[in-house]
Amino acid sequence: MGPLRVIMTIVLVIAELFLIAVVLLQSGKSAGLSGSIAGGAETFFGKHKAKSYEGKLQFLTKVAALAFIIIAVLLALLQ
């Protein structure tokens, strides 16, 4: 196993763990009782959703998934 494959494998594992963490930090679409109580606040802050915590998590999820796919394909090509 060459040093490039070892480094790529380590980066892939880090990307996997980051992707798992970011997905688990996101709240579900049906937030249950807390979602119905905070519904009024969501309409107030809804127009700035991209700058909110949830918007940042969605962006990080997309970036982590893209990095994971690219690194996995590159590792497959190195074999």
Image: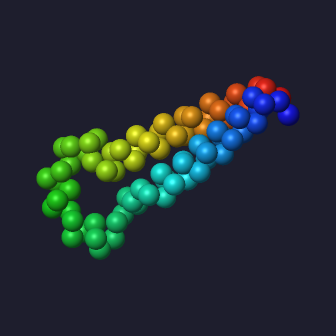
Residue at 18%, 51% (x, y): give it.
45
Q: Is residue 57 left or right of residue 22?
A: left
Front-lying residue, 1 or 16: 1
| Marker count (numbered) | 0
Work out whether 54 lies above or below 1: below
Instruction: Find the residue positioned furthest to the front.
Output: 3
**Quadrant of the rendering where the C terminus is positioned:** top right
Would residue 24 be visible to someone looking at this image? yes
Task: Name the spot of residue 68 as percent of width and height, x first.
Answer: 60, 38
Q: Position of residue 53 (x, y in %)?
A: 31, 50
Q: Does residue 76 appear anywhere in the picture?
A: no
Q: Residue at x 44, y 42 (%)?
A: 60
Q: Quadrant of residue 71?
A: top right
Side (left or right) of 52 relative to 5 = left
Q: With respect to residue 24, does 14 lie above or below? A: above
Which residue is at a point 61% across and 45% down the rendered structure image? 14
Pinpoint residue 2: horizontal percent, then vertical percent: 83, 30
Q: Position of residue 46 (x, y in %)?
A: 20, 49
Q: Is residue 20 left or right of residue 1?
A: left
Q: In screen coordinates, is 28 left or right of 12? A: left
